[in-house]
Image (cartoon, rainbow, N blue to C red):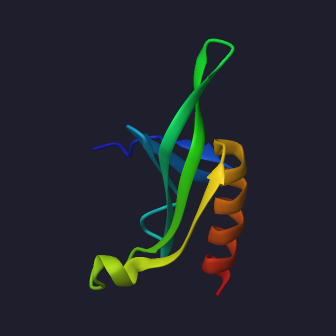
Amino acid sequence: MAEKEFSTYKGKPLVRVGDELYYGSMAERFVIRMQIKSKKEVNGLEVADKVAIQLLCTDPDLSPRKQLVKSSEKNGLYLALDIADVWLERALKS
């Protein structure tokens, strides 16, 4: 079976499922989950307003509570993606 191609951001997979986005590879030790908490209309388009960001450890042996490493909430998807990229880069280097 061929591997599915995902959209990428700064060279890492970016997958959207409804109002959740996952940034990074599940094969790595850490991944980012972003949840769109609210939306607003701008020039007739619906855009993300409040976005919750979570740095998660992908170790399946950890409880969901222990998988959460860091979290925050930002205004707008672009700011959330920038913060997510910094967090993920730092976590993967450690």
Task: Classify 41 as above or below 74.
Answer: above
Quadrant of the frame with the C terminus: bottom right
Examine the rendered structure and indicate whether residue 33 appears above or below residue 55: above
Q: Residue placed at 50% from the left, 66% from the top? A: 31
- The quadrant the N terminus occupies is top left
Q: Is residue 1 left or right of residue 49?
A: left
In the image, taking residue 90 as reference, residue 59 lies left or right, namely left
Residue at x 51% of width, y 66% of height:
54
Can residue 89 be seen?
yes
Task: List x then y, in percent, for residue 67.
Answer: 39, 79
Q: Specify whether 1 is left or right of 47.
A: left
Using the rendered view, name the quadrant where residue 83 is placed: bottom right
Residue shown at the point (62%, 79%) measured from the top left: 91
Q: Is residue 15 left or right of residue 42?
A: left
Q: Nearer the viewer, residue 42 or 93?
A: 42
> How many labels were placed on the picture?
0
Q: Position of residue 25 (x, y in %)?
A: 48, 61
Residue 11 visible here? no
Residue 79 higher or lower than 44, as above or below: below
Give me the residue at 70% from left, 44% from top: 78
Q: Position of residue 70 (x, y in %)?
A: 55, 76
- Frontmost residue, 12 versus 76: 76
Find the residue positioned furthest to the top.
Answer: 44
Residue 27 image position (x, y, % from top left): 43, 68
